[in-house]
Image: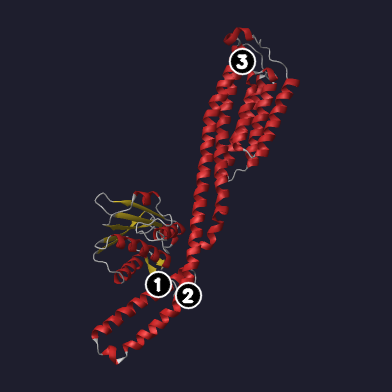
């Protein structure tokens, strides 16, 4: 019901957006890591050249750093201007980092430079960010770069002096490289892992919603079939009751005539339910949406619901404020009916409905004095077949309410009151059904 035939493709249409958002976040992580690399290389080059007295081609190395800065700025602008970041773009960004590292190492000792182990950082990032083929390609490229440095790079004029332990400049360089690798891996792998977990969580939510909306499709088909089947016997009963009203045996007995009137009223209600069910399933029976206003829609909804339910005390407050035009929405009407019916079942003596406007949203709050929701129901609020009434197959009312609200772009929340009873709050953005200006623009 309510356009649920489109929901099977919801996961396929939204999942790429999740992948794109995750790729964009990961690209931002690479940009941040590259800024750290730029600062680290500047400090290292200056310390080695001036502190250790090892001559380095400063002009060439700083020119390369300038190119890396330009590339990093371009990457940052790319990530901000466009939403999607593909695996190929991440792979290319890591290749640029590998190429820059290789060139700097070639200019500063080749494979004998202790910072050659920074290749492991690139491989680890590739394993986290890239698809399998890209990761193994990254392994092959970094291995080839290291082999090339060992074959063609000029050795660093720095004594190894392993026997001096931490007093050896080479060992000190390896220690700094290890600490840098470890720190960057902890920080950025943690962040990237969090991005991936958030993506997986959103994908799981989408799968859950797709499964729930598939339930609605099936329920809609069952309801539509049942409504068609009920149409004929209800029409027959209407004819029979109409004939009975004119029979002398009934017209001469006021009590029987009153009972016939009550039966006809309930029959009309059943026929209205059948029509509404077919309309919700996309099979209108001579009824069309009409232009109304939000306040009038709510007032008429409450009046009709109160007239057809055995409610003892019903408190209704419409504080929506400046009225807005809208097209009458049967799905919205049935959703509110469902919440009110559930509240009435739990609290036959008193229920309350409050309508308010919060920013650009309509809020409908239903309060009752019943026993409230069980903790397990609140924990799984809106899931199908979660019922406190003990009926087999029950618990679909709030499930349908929540999914209708989602279809309209809104949400439904529930909680128990301290003084007893439960509260169900429906929040719907006005842009989904209002035909005039939204709350922020209303005069």
The reply to whether residue 89 is in sight is yes
Q: Where is residue 113 in the image (x, y as percent from the top left)?
A: 66, 18
Q: Is residue 407 above or below residue 40?
A: below
The quadrant where residue 137 appears = top right
* Disc 1: which residue: 273
* Callout in the foreground (3, 2): 2
Crowding around mark 1 (Cα neighbors within 10 Å: few <14, some 14 to 19, many 20+) is some
Q: Toward the viewer: 226 or 381?
A: 226
Disc ID at residue 228? 2
Q: Quadrant of residue 329?
A: bottom left
Under tag 1, what secondary structure? Answer: helix
Q: How many marks overall?
A: 3
Q: Which residue lies furthest to the bottom in this view?
A: 248
Q: In this view, does 367 lie to the left or right of 275?
A: left
Picture coordinates of residue 203, whole percent (x, y): 53, 47
Q: Which of marks 3 and 1 is nearer the N terminus?
A: 3
Distance between the alpha carbons at the discs numbered 2 and 1: 12 Å
Image: 313 above or below 80? below
Mark pair 3, 1: CA separation? 83 Å
C-alpha distance separating marks 3 and 2: 85 Å
| Residue 224 image offset from top left, x and y in percent | 48, 70
Name the N-terminal-most of marks 3 and 2: 3
- Residue at the outermost right position: 151
- Please name the residue shown 54% across and 32% down the image: 189
Label 3: how many Cα within 10 Å (few below 14, some 14–19, many 20+): some
User: Which label is found at residue 94?
Assistant: none
Question: Which quadrant is the C terminus positioned in?
Answer: bottom left
Viewer-nearest of discs 3 and 1: 1
Q: Is any part of residue 1 visible from this angle?
A: no
Q: Mark 2 or mark 1: which comes first in sequence?
A: 2
Number of the label disc, if any, that sits on residue 48: 3
């Amino acid at each position: 019901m309510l356009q649920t035939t489109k929901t099977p493709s919801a996961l396929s249409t939204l999942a790429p957006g999740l992948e794109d958002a995750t790729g964009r976040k990961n690209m931002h992580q690479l940009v941040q890591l590259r800024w750290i690399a730029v600062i680290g290389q500047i400090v290292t080059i200056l310390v080695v050249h001036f502190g250790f007295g090892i001559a380095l081609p400063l002009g060439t190395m700083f020119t390369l750093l300038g190119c890396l800065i330009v590339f990093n700025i371009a990457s940052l602008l790319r990530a901000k201007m466009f939403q999607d970041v593909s695996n190929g773009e991440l792979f290319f960004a890591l290749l640029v980092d590998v190429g820059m590292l290789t060139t700097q190492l070639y200019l500063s000792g080749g494979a004998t430079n202790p910072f050659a182990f920074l290749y492991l950082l690139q491989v680890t990032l590739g394993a986290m960010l890239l698809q399998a083929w890209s990761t193994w390609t990254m392994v092959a490229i970094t291995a080839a770069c290291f082999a090339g440095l060992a074959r063609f790079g000029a050795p660093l004029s720095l004594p190894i002096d392993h026997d001096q332990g931490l007093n050896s400049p080479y060992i000190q360089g390896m220690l700094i490289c290890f600490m840098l690798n470890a720190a960057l891996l902890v920080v950025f792998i943690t962040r990237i892992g969090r991005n991936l977990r958030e993506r997986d969580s959103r994908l799981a939510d989408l799968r859950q919603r797709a499964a729930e909306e598939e339930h609605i499709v099936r329920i809609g088909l069952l309801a539509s079939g049942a409504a068609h089947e009920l149409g004929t016997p209800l029409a027959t009963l209407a004819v029979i009751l109409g004939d009975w009203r004119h029979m002398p045996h009934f017209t001469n007995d006021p009590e029987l005539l009153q009972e016939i009137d009550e039966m006809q009223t309930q029959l009309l209600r059943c026929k209205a339910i059948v029509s509404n069910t077919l309309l919700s399933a996309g099979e209108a029976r001579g009824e069309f949406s009409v232009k109304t206003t939000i306040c009038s829609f709510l007032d008429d909804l409450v009046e009709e619901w109160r007239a057809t339910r055995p409610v003892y005390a019903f408190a209704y407050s419409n504080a929506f404020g400046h009225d807005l035009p809208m097209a009458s929405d049967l799905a919205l009407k049935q959703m509110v009916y469902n919440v009110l019916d559930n509240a009435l079942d739990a609290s036959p003596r008193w229920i309350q409905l409050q309508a308010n406007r919060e920013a650009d949203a309509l809020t409908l709050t239903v309060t009752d004095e019943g026993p409230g929701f069980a903790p397990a129901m609140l924990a799984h609020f809106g899931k199908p077949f979660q019922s406190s009434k003990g009926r087999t197959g029950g618990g679909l009312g709030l499930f349908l309410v929540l999914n209708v609200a989602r279809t309209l772009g809104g949400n439904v929340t529930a909680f128990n009151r301290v003084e007893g009873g439960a509260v169900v709050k429906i929040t719907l953005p006005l842009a989904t059904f209002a035909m005039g200006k939204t709350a922020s623009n209303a005069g």
